Image: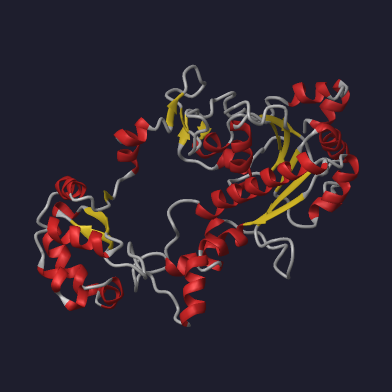
Amino acid sequence: MTNILSGLTVIDITQNVAGPFCSQILGDLGATVIKIERPVHGDDTRHWHPPLWGEESSTFLALNRNKKSVCVDLNDPKGQEIIHQLCKTADIFIHSLKPGSEDSRGLSYEQLSAINPALIHASISAFGDKGKMKNKPGYDPLIQAYSGIMSLTGNEGDDPARVGVSIVDMGTGMWCLIGILTALHQRNETGKGSKVASSLLETGVSWVSLQLSTYMASGNLPKKMGTGMATTVPYQAFKTKGDQWAIIAAGNNRLFKSLCTALEMPELVEDPRFESNSVRVQHREELQQLIEERTTQYELDDLVNLMEQYNVPSSPINTIDRVLRDEQVNALDMIKAVDGFRVSDFRMVDLPFRINEERSHLQSLPPLLGEHTEEILASLNSTEEQYKSLKV
């Protein structure tokens, strides 16, 4: 897999989560990724700690493998010239600068495509590059709030809650990557580069597309559903012994009948309140109470095993330590140990797909700040004096 994009060069002027996640995937697939960082400070995530892994931010380490770090001051005309030189032979340029600020640095699509017409220019912003809010900064929780995700998260009556993972940031990295790969395909046919624009807000809106469709169809605002789903019942978490929880997803009549058989509750199948999904949705709370009276009689693993015997989709609600030890997760080889790294016991979470049964391979460890500055500038025939002037 690491040879698929080999030969492509990426100039990455992003930081935090969305952009680095996007460029890390490109690096995992074999592209050469040159990560441009501010001198001295570097990517903000280098300072997102605790926790530290060794002496480094675990967040930075999770998002920046297979890259080279080059320190360049983008506010210095000499630094901007370095980026121009790199872009002459690069294939992809990714930035997360505030919309419009790339123009003042000579890094807009129009400016860079004049240097290299085949360059794919990709941007990641918070609220998009149009409209009155285009210059506003934004982070994952802000967009979860603004896009409506937060209004749907948690149990009814609870205080607002953020989805516990960086779903907007990492989703934006993925959507930006999809745009880049599409532009690469188009370039193979036309020879011309493209302008790819993505934003956290557009990602957030796309994640609530089902709820938007429901509202547009019914005029009813979706409610917080906890672990449940508005359109299907039973499809949620049920308590077991010891205040542990299992998700049971009986998403059709056949599965509902299997669930009732497994729990020795055949009377529910004959009950007119539960005879079809549409009426089960109307009697959600009554059905949940009846099922949970039975599930609380089981130990968690016993209930999950029982569901498996009757082919009813279910899962324990795992904590992260259980995920790390999980037999199925490890059978998929998702989490890899890396030997000989400056951080002891370093492990990485691999890409969530395989091609011809092959996963990606770690080609280079997350770089130290400015680790490759001299190497890259030397390749541009920069003089030592020029290099020193940039190292501030």
Q: Residue furthest right?
A: 114
Exactly how many numbered labels are in the figure? Answer: 0
Residue lying at 49% horizontally and 37% vertically, measured from the top left: 353
Residue lying at 18% horizontally and 45% vertically, measured from the top left: 305
- Whether residue 38 is visible, yes or no, is no
Between 389 and 67, the one nearer to me in the picture: 67
> Residue 321: horizontal and vertical position, in percent?
32, 39
Q: Quadrant of residue 371?
A: top right
Q: Residue furthest bottom?
A: 219
> Residue 63: horizontal and vertical position, in percent?
56, 38
Between 306 and 320, the one nearer to me in the picture: 306
Q: Indicate how the structure is coloured in the image.
A: secondary structure
Q: Quadrant of residue 322?
A: top left
Q: Is residue 25 left or right of residue 341?
A: right
Q: Residue furthest front?
A: 254
Q: Residue furthest top?
A: 340
- Whether residue 35 is visible, yes or no, is yes
Quick one: quadrant of the N terminus? top right
Between 62 and 219, the one nearer to me in the picture: 219
> Residue 106: horizontal and vertical position, in percent?
86, 47
> Residue 169: horizontal and vertical position, in percent?
56, 51
Quick one: quadrant of the C terminus? top right
Residue lying at 83% horizontally and 43% vertically, measured from the top left: 192
* Placement of 49 over or under 296, stated as above or below: above
* Placement of 318 over or under 60, stated as above or below: below
Q: Is residue 116 left or right of residue 38?
A: right
